Amino acid sequence: MGCMVSSLASKFAFFPPSPPTYQLKKCDDGKLTVVSTASPIPHPDDNSLDVLLVDTKHGNKIVAFYLKNPYARLTLLYSHGNAADLGQLYDLFVQLKVNLRVNLMGYDYSGYGASTGKPSESSTYADIEAIYECLETEYGVGQEDVILYGQSVGSGPTLHLASKLPRLRGVVLHSGILSGLRVLCHVKFSFCFDIYKNINKIKKVKCPVLVIHGTEDDVVNWLHGNRLWKMARESYEPLWIKGGGHCNLELYPDYIRHLCKFIQEMENMTTGKRLKKIRQSLNSKSNTCSACTCRGITSCCSCKCKLPKCSNCCSCINFSLSINCPDCCWKPNCFKCCCLPKLTNCFGSTCCTKCSRPSCCCVPKCSLPCCYPTCSRPSCCISCFCWQCFMGKHSGRNGKQRG
């Protein structure tokens, strides 16, 4: 049932231009070129554009444009939005290549433009994987030099690939979506038939993420971009374009200005700087009592422990008697003793020093001075664990039998 609904959702999600805005033509030398009346496509002799036909694992052949910039250090892998194909996007690609000083790889999904097959969520995943493999094998581009760019629906395949590549240089989400169903209605849960569950995949991306979204987007609400930005592990300064819609953000000056800033910072981010930043992030997280474990719970302390060795602070097995822990906080499932201010008059007796709760160690003391050879808890308030005392078999302080 879920697969059938997912297939139905895909039919509503994809709108390839019909007819396509371009066609492929094979030259005498075997190279592919593009014929189009909709947009200015360069002359076949122009060496700055490679037109590729890439095979996917689904058996489809997808068209890709690779625009080369001789001054580029990074490569932008662009996944476009809905109702568009490469013929319409070529002019934008040229502008991005020149202004951002990058190589740019753009591609059409299965069923879009001159690409074969039918569009679906799974086919777009296969498409971007094939294009990335082409970048590696044909152009020698490693993931450290790749920035993934996803616009609208393109944020789906972008985050799919980004979640699998731990050493990516960066990710750009342009009018990105939380999930397909969340575009149509405000739901708080993910359903099996939902498509492009970016809300789950964004947490797995380990590189800097730039989010660009228009505040007046009437197709994908700005809240989608805002939440993606907040959920990213390494969020870059977002760009909220005031008054921007869904398909016109490229017309705003802030768009290219902010992208240039992001690309320059990604260029300057060397491997050493990146590793240093990761170590700092890990060190900051390690200060939150990570050594305290409560049977599968990663931390029994909700704030930073001030003790140098947290393992001596809260050692919880089922429940803990965390002794000598003056600076560490606790969770309800960590049964603690002697951590909080002294309580008195617990069951009519004086409690131990710094007892945290009456149920911990504030029980009536054994009345006999020596009812058991060795007291089991001399440092706490229980004089002994003598069963006769608890059962009332020994005589009390006044020499009377306890019933």
Image (tube, rainbow, N blue to C red):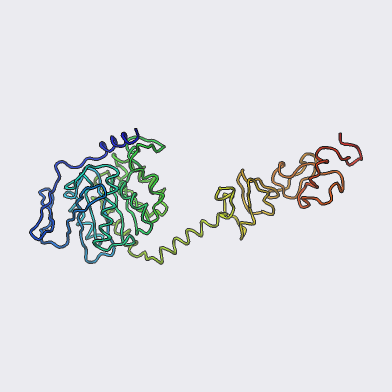
Q: Quadrant of residue 14?
A: top left
Residue 247 located left or right of residue 228: left
Q: Nearer the viewer, residue 341 or 142?
A: 142
Q: Is residue 95 above or below residue 216?
A: below
Considering only vertical position in the picture, is 226 above or below 257?
Answer: above
The quadrant of the picture occupied by the N terminus is: top left
Q: Say which residue appears at 30% left-offset and 54% top-offset.
A: 148
Q: Is residue 63 left or right of residue 244?
A: left
Quadrant position of the C terminus in the picture:
top right
Q: Please, which residue is most extreme toward the left here?
A: 28
In the displayed orientation, state which residue is furthest to the right: 399
Please tell me in which quadrant of the rendered image residue 75 appears.
bottom left
Residue 273 place in picture, x, y as percent:
41, 65
Residue 222, horizontal then vertical, whole percent: 34, 43
Is 326 on the left or on the right of 254, as rendered?
right
The answer to whether residue 235 is above or below residue 227 is below
Residue 19, percent across and down?
14, 42
Question: x, y (%) of residue 136?
Answer: 28, 60
Q: Residue furthest top?
A: 1
